[in-house]
Amino acid sequence: MLTLTVQPTRGVFLMSTDGVDLKKRRTLTAATSVVGAVGVGFFAVPFLKAWNPSEKAKAAGAPVEADIGKLEPGQMMRVKWRGKPVWIVHRTERNLADLSSMDSSLADPASDVPQQPEYCKNPTRSIKAPYLVAVGICTHLGCSPTYRPDIGAADMGGEAWKGGFFCPCHGSKFDLAGRVYSGMPAPTNLEIPPHQYLSDAVILVGEDGGAA
Ligand code: FES
């Protein structure tokens, strides 16, 4: 029989195995182990299920196709990728010419900060010069800037404004390659997501076939 001896002055419990029924103890130990194993199995199933991404979660991270076949020069369209807005802008010849004259106004004109895949580290930050593909989230605190293609807009600086994006939250300005102007709250250029052309009219946003 198991005997507990209490020594109050030290607050210590001493156990004695005198008279312990070892057979009964072994049986109890085995039974406890079985219950424990069953318990782990019972609870492990829901957890394992939670670790496997659902179809919905997989779809949320999936690449997205954008049909640019009807996107006219000067227009912008939006697609949603991983819950974020992605802009596709069809830049005009004039827009492209203006991009090369912007350097002195920009914080990172050569896109040295890696905010784009390597294949978009070029003066237009794109695979095909006419099309800008950019994540439409300001790099300051995450607002979504407004598309302002209106060259020379008085409220954007008049003559100096060559079209771009304006973040109304704290006033950051970006050019039509998503490059941030100098002295703005936004610290970096807009992000260019991985993407590739499936055809002349279809862009796949979110996957580049390992081209990065
Ligand atoms: S969130 Fe765009 S400027 Fe602050």
Image (cartoon, rainbow, N blue to C red):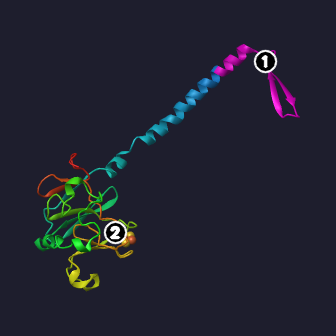
Secondary structure, mark 2, is loop
Assess whether residue 138 is covered by the magenta stretch. no
Examine the rendered structure and indicate whether residue 78 appears above or below residue 25: below
Q: Residue furthest front?
A: 104
- In percent of the image, x 48 and y 35: which residue is there? 45
Mark 2 or mark 1: which comes first in sequence?
1
View quadrant of ligand 1: bottom left
Q: Quadrant of the N terminus?
A: top right
Residue 61 in percent (x, y) is at: 32, 50
Residue 170 in percent (x, y) is at: 39, 75
Q: Which residue is mark 1?
A: 17
- In percent of the image, x 38 and y 66: which residue is there? 142
Crowd band around label 1 with a 10 angstrom C-alpha radius: few (<14), some (14–19), many (20+): few
Residue 76 in percent (x, y) is at: 21, 69
- In percent of the image, x 17 and y 63: which residue is there? 131
As measured in the structure, the alpha-carbon distance from the residue carrying label 2 to the one carrying label 1 is 72 Å
Residue placed most toward the observer, 81 or 135: 135
**Amino acid tagged 1:** Thr
Task: Indicate the quadrant where residue 16 lies.
Answer: top right
Magenta residues, start to end: 1-29
Task: Indicate the quadrant where residue 80 lies.
Answer: bottom left
Q: Does label 2 point to a residue whose CB lies under 8 Å from ligand 1? A: no
Examine the rendered structure and indicate whether residue 203 appears above or below residue 173: above
Residue 47 in percent (x, y) is at: 48, 39
Q: Does residue 56 appear left or right of residue 75 in this picture?
A: right
Examine the rendered structure and indicate whether residue 169 appears above or below residue 23: below
**Amino acid tagged 2:** Ser
Tag of residue 144: 2
Residue placed most toward the observer, 196 or 10: 10
Tag of residue 38: none
- In percent of the image, x 20 and y 64: which residue is there? 132
Q: Does residue 9 appear left or right of residue 83 in this picture?
A: right
